[in-house]
Amino acid sequence: AMQCGTAVMTSRETAMAEIGGDAVMQVAPKDIHAMTDCIASLANDAEILSNLSRKGIERATQFSWQHCAEHTLGAYQLTAH
């Protein structure tokens, strides 16, 4: 979603919060009011939506299959030695 420029809301108590960083809106997973406030902000505030879209696209560039493969290979090589 971030790579496509879509604003993201995620739980602050999962790995997604770390992955998204400041490019996502984070809410407590059981806080319904926070979730509805977040959705309302995204629906009604073009500036927030635009900022998250820009930050999401930028943040997504830090993740790629190439990067994943290089780190996985490095871990295998470290383990083999």
Image (cartoon, rainbow, N blue to C red):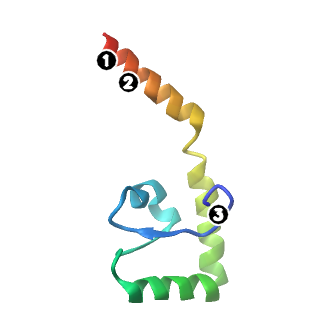
Name the residue at 56% across, 53% down: 59
Question: Which structural element holds mark 2?
Answer: helix
Q: Relative to residue 76, is residue 81 drawn left or right?
A: left
Tell me the kind of residue under disc 2: Ala
Question: Which structural element holds mark 1?
Answer: helix
The label number, if any, that marks residue 36 in the structure image? none
Question: Which structural element holds mark 3?
Answer: helix
Name the residue at 35% across, 60% down: 14
Name the residue at 48% across, 59% down: 20
- For the residue carrying disc 2, how many other residues have a C-alpha within 10 Å: few (<14), some (14-19), or many (20+)? few
Mark 3, residue position:
54
Which residue is situated farthest in the top direction here?
A: 81
Tell me the kind of residue under disc 3: Arg
Count of residue discs: 3
Residue 19 locus on image (x, y percent) = 45, 54
Name the residue at 48% across, 87% down: 36
Tell me the kind of residue under disc 1: Thr
Proximity of marks 2 and 1: CB atoms separated by less than 8 Å: yes
Q: In the rendered structure, which disc, 2 or 3, sits on the residue that comes first in sequence?
A: 3
- Marks 2/3: CA–CA distance: 32 Å
- Marks 1/3: CA–CA distance: 38 Å
Residue 50 locus on image (x, y percent) = 66, 73
